Amino acid sequence: GGGGGGGGAVVQLQGGAKRTSVDDEFVALRATRGSAFGKSDGNRSAGGKHGFNAKAAGASIPVFEESESVSGRLIITPKDAKAKPLQHLGIRVEFVGSIELMYESDLSHEFTSLLREVDDTGTITSTRTYTFTFQNALKTYDTYCGTHVRLRYFVRVTILRPQYTPNVVREFDVAVQHGLRELGATLPPVSPIRMEVGIEDALHIEFEYNKNRYELNDVVTGKIYFLLVRVKIKRMEIEIRRRESAGAGSSVYNETDIIAKFEAMDGAPVRGESIPIRLFLSAYPTLTPTYIAINNRFSVKYYLNLVIIDQDDRRYFKQAEIVLWRAAAT
Protein backbone atom coordinates (compact mmCIF):
# COMPACT_ATOMS: atom_id res chain seq x y z
CA GLY A 1 0.00 0.00 0.00
CA GLY A 2 1.12 3.54 -0.64
CA GLY A 3 1.42 6.48 1.72
CA GLY A 4 3.06 9.80 2.51
CA GLY A 5 2.47 11.17 -0.97
CA GLY A 6 5.14 8.86 -2.32
CA GLY A 7 4.54 5.27 -3.32
CA GLY A 8 3.79 1.70 -2.42
CA ALA A 9 6.04 -0.93 -0.84
CA VAL A 10 5.82 -4.71 -1.15
CA VAL A 11 8.08 -7.26 0.55
CA GLN A 12 8.64 -10.71 -0.93
CA LEU A 13 10.39 -13.12 1.45
CA GLN A 14 12.50 -16.09 0.51
CA GLY A 15 12.70 -19.03 2.92
CA GLY A 16 10.35 -19.95 5.68
CA ALA A 17 8.92 -23.42 5.87
CA LYS A 18 5.65 -24.25 4.19
CA ARG A 19 2.84 -25.00 6.62
CA THR A 20 -0.68 -26.25 6.00
CA SER A 21 -1.68 -25.16 9.48
CA VAL A 22 -0.20 -23.09 12.27
CA ASP A 23 -1.20 -23.62 15.88
CA ASP A 24 -0.92 -20.06 17.13
CA GLU A 25 -3.97 -17.81 16.68
CA PHE A 26 -1.87 -14.83 15.61
CA VAL A 27 -0.49 -16.72 12.62
CA ALA A 28 -2.57 -17.24 9.50
CA LEU A 29 -3.88 -20.68 8.71
CA ARG A 30 -1.65 -21.01 5.65
CA ALA A 31 2.01 -20.17 5.05
CA THR A 32 3.73 -20.16 1.70
CA ARG A 33 7.37 -19.87 0.70
CA GLY A 34 8.33 -16.50 -0.78
CA SER A 35 4.81 -15.10 -0.92
CA ALA A 36 4.14 -11.38 -1.02
CA PHE A 37 2.07 -10.21 1.89
CA GLY A 38 1.18 -7.15 3.90
CA LYS A 39 -1.24 -6.03 6.58
CA SER A 40 -4.59 -7.73 6.25
CA ASP A 41 -7.69 -5.63 5.75
CA GLY A 42 -10.04 -8.15 7.33
CA ASN A 43 -8.86 -8.83 10.86
CA ARG A 44 -10.33 -11.16 13.44
CA SER A 45 -9.95 -11.09 17.19
CA ALA A 46 -7.61 -13.63 18.75
CA GLY A 47 -7.49 -14.48 22.40
CA GLY A 48 -10.87 -13.46 23.75
CA LYS A 49 -12.88 -10.29 24.03
CA HIS A 50 -9.87 -8.12 24.85
CA GLY A 51 -7.51 -9.78 22.37
CA PHE A 52 -5.27 -8.14 19.78
CA ASN A 53 -6.31 -8.20 16.16
CA ALA A 54 -4.84 -11.16 14.31
CA LYS A 55 -4.27 -11.98 10.68
CA ALA A 56 -7.44 -12.82 8.84
CA ALA A 57 -7.98 -16.50 8.25
CA GLY A 58 -6.73 -17.45 4.81
CA ALA A 59 -3.96 -14.83 4.61
CA SER A 60 -0.49 -16.15 3.83
CA ILE A 61 2.46 -15.62 6.13
CA PRO A 62 5.91 -17.27 6.09
CA VAL A 63 6.84 -19.42 9.09
CA PHE A 64 10.50 -19.53 10.14
CA GLU A 65 12.47 -21.68 12.55
CA GLU A 66 15.12 -20.30 14.89
CA SER A 67 18.13 -21.11 12.69
CA GLU A 68 16.75 -19.77 9.40
CA SER A 69 17.91 -16.50 7.86
CA VAL A 70 15.28 -13.97 6.79
CA SER A 71 15.88 -12.64 3.28
CA GLY A 72 13.81 -11.21 0.48
CA ARG A 73 13.10 -8.40 -1.93
CA LEU A 74 11.67 -4.93 -1.34
CA ILE A 75 9.75 -3.54 -4.32
CA ILE A 76 8.93 0.19 -4.29
CA THR A 77 6.66 1.75 -6.91
CA PRO A 78 6.00 5.54 -7.01
CA LYS A 79 2.32 6.49 -7.13
CA ASP A 80 2.74 8.85 -10.08
CA ALA A 81 6.37 8.90 -11.20
CA LYS A 82 5.75 11.30 -14.13
CA ALA A 83 3.95 13.97 -12.11
CA LYS A 84 5.97 13.62 -8.90
CA PRO A 85 8.97 11.26 -8.52
CA LEU A 86 9.53 9.80 -5.08
CA GLN A 87 12.27 11.78 -3.34
CA HIS A 88 13.80 10.22 -0.25
CA LEU A 89 16.66 10.59 2.22
CA GLY A 90 17.34 6.86 2.44
CA ILE A 91 15.52 3.54 2.67
CA ARG A 92 15.81 1.16 5.63
CA VAL A 93 14.73 -2.41 6.19
CA GLU A 94 14.56 -3.75 9.78
CA PHE A 95 13.89 -7.17 11.23
CA VAL A 96 12.15 -6.68 14.58
CA GLY A 97 10.97 -8.96 17.37
CA SER A 98 8.70 -7.25 19.89
CA ILE A 99 6.46 -7.97 22.88
CA GLU A 100 3.36 -5.82 23.25
CA LEU A 101 1.39 -5.59 26.51
CA MET A 102 -2.09 -4.11 26.20
CA TYR A 103 -2.06 -2.26 29.50
CA GLU A 104 1.32 -0.53 29.06
CA SER A 105 1.36 3.02 27.73
CA ASP A 106 4.51 2.15 25.81
CA LEU A 107 2.99 -0.87 24.13
CA SER A 108 6.02 -2.36 22.38
CA HIS A 109 9.24 -3.76 23.85
CA GLU A 110 11.69 -4.72 21.09
CA PHE A 111 13.90 -7.61 22.16
CA THR A 112 15.65 -7.95 18.81
CA SER A 113 16.27 -5.47 16.00
CA LEU A 114 18.53 -5.66 12.94
CA LEU A 115 18.85 -2.78 10.47
CA ARG A 116 19.88 -2.72 6.81
CA GLU A 117 20.33 0.51 4.83
CA VAL A 118 19.34 -0.50 1.29
CA ASP A 119 19.56 2.93 -0.39
CA ASP A 120 21.07 6.38 0.16
CA THR A 121 19.46 9.74 -0.60
CA GLY A 122 17.95 9.81 -4.08
CA THR A 123 14.92 9.92 -6.32
CA ILE A 124 12.81 6.97 -7.52
CA THR A 125 11.15 7.52 -10.91
CA SER A 126 10.05 3.94 -11.63
CA THR A 127 9.63 0.62 -9.85
CA ARG A 128 12.82 -0.28 -7.99
CA THR A 129 13.76 -3.57 -6.34
CA TYR A 130 16.16 -4.02 -3.40
CA THR A 131 17.39 -7.26 -1.86
CA PHE A 132 18.10 -7.78 1.84
CA THR A 133 19.26 -10.56 4.15
CA PHE A 134 19.20 -10.87 7.92
CA GLN A 135 21.69 -13.66 8.51
CA ASN A 136 21.04 -15.67 11.69
CA ALA A 137 18.45 -13.16 12.87
CA LEU A 138 17.71 -13.71 16.55
CA LYS A 139 14.38 -15.53 16.85
CA THR A 140 14.48 -16.80 20.42
CA TYR A 141 10.74 -17.10 21.07
CA ASP A 142 7.60 -18.32 19.34
CA THR A 143 5.09 -15.97 17.78
CA TYR A 144 2.17 -15.64 20.20
CA CYS A 145 -1.03 -13.62 20.41
CA GLY A 146 -3.05 -13.80 23.59
CA THR A 147 -5.47 -11.71 25.58
CA HIS A 148 -3.09 -9.22 27.18
CA VAL A 149 0.16 -9.88 25.33
CA ARG A 150 1.39 -10.33 21.79
CA LEU A 151 4.84 -11.47 20.65
CA ARG A 152 5.41 -10.75 16.98
CA TYR A 153 8.18 -10.61 14.39
CA PHE A 154 8.01 -8.34 11.38
CA VAL A 155 10.02 -6.68 8.62
CA ARG A 156 9.70 -2.90 8.88
CA VAL A 157 10.35 -0.77 5.79
CA THR A 158 11.01 2.96 6.28
CA ILE A 159 11.33 5.44 3.41
CA LEU A 160 12.85 8.60 4.90
CA ARG A 161 11.24 11.69 3.37
CA PRO A 162 12.45 15.30 3.11
CA GLN A 163 11.59 17.82 5.80
CA TYR A 164 7.89 18.36 6.60
CA THR A 165 6.93 15.23 4.66
CA PRO A 166 5.99 12.22 6.79
CA ASN A 167 8.09 9.09 6.38
CA VAL A 168 6.54 6.08 4.68
CA VAL A 169 6.54 3.15 7.14
CA ARG A 170 5.19 -0.33 6.44
CA GLU A 171 5.35 -3.50 8.55
CA PHE A 172 5.14 -7.05 7.14
CA ASP A 173 4.58 -9.84 9.66
CA VAL A 174 6.42 -13.15 9.71
CA ALA A 175 5.89 -16.03 12.13
CA VAL A 176 8.39 -18.03 14.18
CA GLN A 177 7.84 -21.52 15.58
CA HIS A 178 10.35 -23.61 17.53
CA GLY A 179 10.29 -27.37 17.70
CA LEU A 180 12.09 -29.65 20.15
CA ARG A 181 14.29 -32.38 18.73
CA GLU A 182 15.86 -33.50 22.02
CA LEU A 183 13.67 -33.27 25.09
CA GLY A 184 16.45 -33.47 27.67
CA ALA A 185 16.12 -31.10 30.60
CA THR A 186 13.79 -28.74 28.73
CA LEU A 187 10.70 -30.66 29.88
CA PRO A 188 9.68 -32.26 33.18
CA PRO A 189 10.07 -36.04 33.41
CA VAL A 190 7.08 -38.04 32.24
CA SER A 191 4.80 -39.23 35.03
CA PRO A 192 1.08 -40.00 35.31
CA ILE A 193 -1.31 -37.59 36.99
CA ARG A 194 -3.46 -39.07 39.76
CA MET A 195 -5.90 -36.98 41.80
CA GLU A 196 -9.09 -37.28 43.87
CA VAL A 197 -12.20 -35.16 44.15
CA GLY A 198 -15.08 -35.65 46.54
CA ILE A 199 -17.60 -34.52 49.09
CA GLU A 200 -17.57 -36.21 52.47
CA ASP A 201 -20.04 -39.12 52.60
CA ALA A 202 -21.53 -38.06 49.25
CA LEU A 203 -19.01 -38.32 46.41
CA HIS A 204 -15.57 -39.85 45.99
CA ILE A 205 -13.88 -39.93 42.59
CA GLU A 206 -10.37 -40.87 41.58
CA PHE A 207 -9.06 -39.92 38.17
CA GLU A 208 -5.80 -40.37 36.33
CA TYR A 209 -4.25 -39.12 33.09
CA ASN A 210 -1.57 -41.13 31.35
CA LYS A 211 1.12 -38.43 31.63
CA ASN A 212 1.85 -34.85 32.59
CA ARG A 213 3.31 -33.55 29.31
CA TYR A 214 1.97 -33.76 25.79
CA GLU A 215 3.12 -32.89 22.29
CA LEU A 216 0.59 -30.73 20.47
CA ASN A 217 -0.57 -33.70 18.39
CA ASP A 218 -0.73 -36.18 21.26
CA VAL A 219 -3.81 -37.91 22.66
CA VAL A 220 -4.74 -37.44 26.31
CA THR A 221 -5.91 -40.75 27.74
CA GLY A 222 -7.01 -41.69 31.23
CA LYS A 223 -9.75 -43.10 33.45
CA ILE A 224 -12.17 -41.82 36.04
CA TYR A 225 -13.22 -44.14 38.90
CA PHE A 226 -16.41 -43.61 40.90
CA LEU A 227 -15.78 -45.02 44.38
CA LEU A 228 -18.77 -43.39 46.11
CA VAL A 229 -21.81 -41.86 44.37
CA ARG A 230 -24.60 -40.41 46.50
CA VAL A 231 -25.02 -37.33 44.33
CA LYS A 232 -27.29 -37.36 41.27
CA ILE A 233 -24.77 -36.59 38.54
CA LYS A 234 -26.09 -35.27 35.24
CA ARG A 235 -22.91 -35.13 33.17
CA MET A 236 -19.11 -34.81 33.31
CA GLU A 237 -16.81 -32.64 31.18
CA ILE A 238 -13.09 -32.28 30.59
CA GLU A 239 -11.85 -28.76 29.82
CA ILE A 240 -8.50 -27.54 28.53
CA ARG A 241 -7.81 -24.19 30.11
CA ARG A 242 -5.11 -21.70 29.18
CA ARG A 243 -3.88 -19.26 31.82
CA GLU A 244 -1.96 -16.27 30.56
CA SER A 245 0.07 -14.16 33.02
CA ALA A 246 1.46 -10.90 31.67
CA GLY A 247 3.62 -8.33 33.46
CA ALA A 248 5.80 -8.49 36.54
CA GLY A 249 5.67 -7.74 40.27
CA SER A 250 2.46 -6.06 41.37
CA SER A 251 1.42 -5.40 37.77
CA VAL A 252 0.64 -8.96 36.72
CA TYR A 253 -2.53 -9.55 34.71
CA ASN A 254 -3.99 -13.06 34.66
CA GLU A 255 -6.53 -14.30 32.16
CA THR A 256 -7.97 -17.81 31.89
CA ASP A 257 -9.65 -19.02 28.71
CA ILE A 258 -11.40 -22.32 28.01
CA ILE A 259 -9.74 -23.62 24.85
CA ALA A 260 -11.67 -26.89 24.61
CA LYS A 261 -14.60 -28.61 26.29
CA PHE A 262 -15.09 -32.36 25.95
CA GLU A 263 -18.10 -34.26 27.29
CA ALA A 264 -16.72 -37.37 28.97
CA MET A 265 -20.01 -38.72 30.34
CA ASP A 266 -23.72 -38.09 29.97
CA GLY A 267 -25.95 -39.65 32.63
CA ALA A 268 -25.64 -40.91 36.17
CA PRO A 269 -22.77 -43.28 37.03
CA VAL A 270 -22.92 -45.99 39.66
CA ARG A 271 -20.46 -46.99 42.35
CA GLY A 272 -17.53 -48.96 40.97
CA GLU A 273 -17.96 -47.69 37.43
CA SER A 274 -14.95 -46.38 35.45
CA ILE A 275 -15.13 -43.95 32.52
CA PRO A 276 -12.34 -43.87 29.91
CA ILE A 277 -10.97 -40.56 28.60
CA ARG A 278 -9.60 -40.02 25.13
CA LEU A 279 -8.94 -36.44 24.01
CA PHE A 280 -7.19 -35.61 20.70
CA LEU A 281 -5.16 -32.40 21.09
CA SER A 282 -4.74 -32.02 17.32
CA ALA A 283 -8.43 -31.12 17.15
CA TYR A 284 -7.66 -27.79 18.85
CA PRO A 285 -5.36 -25.73 16.58
CA THR A 286 -5.23 -22.74 18.94
CA LEU A 287 -3.18 -24.67 21.51
CA THR A 288 0.41 -23.45 21.86
CA PRO A 289 3.36 -24.83 23.80
CA THR A 290 3.66 -23.95 27.47
CA TYR A 291 5.68 -20.74 27.86
CA ILE A 292 7.47 -19.83 31.11
CA ALA A 293 8.78 -16.31 31.80
CA ILE A 294 9.24 -15.30 28.16
CA ASN A 295 11.65 -12.37 28.24
CA ASN A 296 10.48 -12.03 31.89
CA ARG A 297 7.25 -10.53 30.56
CA PHE A 298 4.66 -13.28 30.24
CA SER A 299 3.89 -16.96 30.80
CA VAL A 300 1.30 -19.33 29.35
CA LYS A 301 0.23 -22.48 31.22
CA TYR A 302 -2.32 -25.19 30.47
CA TYR A 303 -4.62 -27.20 32.73
CA LEU A 304 -6.94 -30.19 32.39
CA ASN A 305 -10.07 -29.33 34.35
CA LEU A 306 -12.49 -32.10 35.36
CA VAL A 307 -16.02 -30.73 35.85
CA ILE A 308 -18.94 -32.72 37.31
CA ILE A 309 -22.47 -31.24 37.07
CA ASP A 310 -25.26 -32.64 39.25
CA GLN A 311 -29.02 -32.55 38.70
CA ASP A 312 -29.26 -29.19 40.47
CA ASP A 313 -26.55 -27.76 38.15
CA ARG A 314 -24.02 -27.56 40.96
CA ARG A 315 -20.49 -27.95 39.68
CA TYR A 316 -17.60 -29.86 41.25
CA PHE A 317 -14.20 -29.57 39.66
CA LYS A 318 -10.54 -30.42 39.99
CA GLN A 319 -7.74 -29.29 37.72
CA ALA A 320 -4.24 -30.52 36.99
CA GLU A 321 -1.47 -28.65 35.20
CA ILE A 322 0.00 -30.18 32.06
CA VAL A 323 2.97 -29.13 29.92
CA LEU A 324 2.48 -28.79 26.16
CA TRP A 325 5.35 -28.81 23.68
CA ARG A 326 5.89 -28.85 19.92
CA ALA A 327 8.00 -31.42 18.11
CA ALA A 328 10.47 -30.19 15.51
CA ALA A 329 9.33 -30.33 11.90
CA THR A 330 10.65 -33.31 9.97
Image (tube, rainbow, N blue to C red):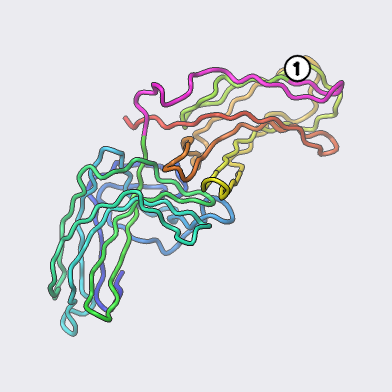
User: Which quadrant is the C terminus positioned in?
Assistant: top left
241 above or below 25? above
Look at the image and tell me whether residue 278 can be seen: yes
Residue lying farthest to the bottom in this orientation:
83
Residue at 38% in and 47% down: 30
The amino acid sitting under disc 1 is Glu
Which percent across, then down, holds residue 176? Answer: 35, 43
Using the rendered view, name the quadrant where residue 271 is placed.
Answer: top right
Answer with left or right where residue 272 lies relative to residue 83: right
Magenta segment: 179-205
Residue at 31% in and 53% down: 96
Answer with left or right where residue 164 lies relative to residue 55: left
Residue lying farthest to the front in this orientation:
249
Residue at 18% in and 50% down: 133
Q: Is residue 190 magenta?
A: yes
Q: Is residue 194 magenta?
A: yes
Question: Callout 1: helix, strand or loop?
Answer: loop
Residue at 47% in and 32% down: 216
Answer with left or right where residue 240 lies relative to residue 99: right
327 above or below 60? above
237 above or below 121? above
Residue lying farthest to the top in this orientation:
272
Using the rendered view, name the quadrant where residue 185 is placed.
Answer: top left
> Looking at the image, which is closer to me, 139 or 13?
139
Which percent across, then down, holds residue 303? Answer: 59, 33
Query: Which residue lies under the disc numbered 1?
Result: 273
Look at the image and tell me whether residue 275 can be seen: no
Which percent across, then down, holds residue 48? Answer: 57, 52
Count of number-bearing discs = 1
Which percent across, then down, holds residue 229? Answer: 83, 21
